[in-house]
Amino acid sequence: MSARTPWRTVLRALGHRTRVARPLGEPVVVQRPTPLTTERVGDDLARRGYRFRVDSDGDVTGTWDGNRFWFLLLGDHREILQVRGRWAGLVPPSARLAVLQAANDWNRERIWPKVYTREEGGGMALYAEVSVDFEHGATDDQLAATRSTPSPAAPSRSTARTSSP
């Protein structure tokens, strides 16, 4: 067993892919980071079969499995991609304490996405969000990884449909 094997096991457990040897003579494809744009976010979603729209603020948004998601470009140069999802329901009053404890546990035990609640429309809404700074650009793989961040309410491609305002 090589000295590198334990690290590969740890990296694999953390979700990193182990590089696979390419056939001799096959060219190496290197993705160069390019600036983050609304169009690139939309292209990434469209490539994967998601349907979405761009709202009046210029944010990409969609509804999957009844849950609303936003893909926001933030920062002085719109270099920060924030993916935010909202669970379709409201937390029943009898479950508020349990949901708050579960959100606290989630945030304590995981680096991202953060989970939080917010009072809305006479009830408590549940959100998950992750923000990534792409100041120096992003590759297509990096955008895809941000979109598919593990979340308690991650979108399901098979039930994608166009969102309504």
Image (spheres, rainbow, N blue to C red):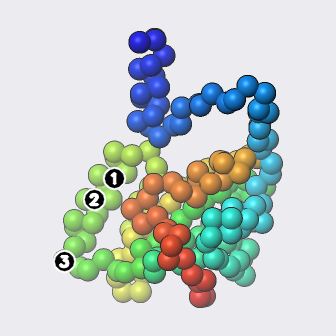
Residue 163: percent from left, percent from top = 59, 83
- Residue beneath disc 1: 106
* Position of residue 5 in the picture relative to residue 48 (left or right): left
Q: Quadrant of residue 131?
A: bottom right
Q: What secondary structure is found at the residue carrying circle 3?
A: helix
Question: Gap between marks 1 and 2, in whole Å?
Answer: 6 Å
Q: Are marks 1 and 2 in contact (CB under 8 Å)?
A: yes
The residue tagged with tag 2: helix, strand or loop?
helix
Disc 3/disc 1 C-alpha distance (Å) = 20 Å
Residue 107 in view, yes or no: yes
Looking at the image, residue 36 sits to the left or right of residue 7; the answer is right
Instruction: Name the residue that disc number 2 marks.
Output: 102
Q: Which mark is residue 94?
A: 3
Disc 2 residue type (three-letter):
Ala
Instruction: Please give the count of numbered marks on the rendered protein.
Output: 3
Please state the horizontal and vertical placement of residue 91, each as a whole percent of the image. Answer: 30, 77
In the drawing, does residue 109 fall left or right of residue 163? left
Q: Residue at x 45, y 54 (%)?
A: 150
**Which residue is farthest left?**
94
Identify the image quadrant of the N terminus: top left
The answer to which of marks 3 and 1 sits earlier in the sequence is 3
- Real-space CA distance between mark 3 and mark 2, rounded to the nearest whole angstrom: 14 Å
Task: Kindly tell me whether residue 68 is visible in this rendering.
Answer: no
Identify whether 60 is placed above or below 81.
below
Label 1, secondary structure: give it: helix
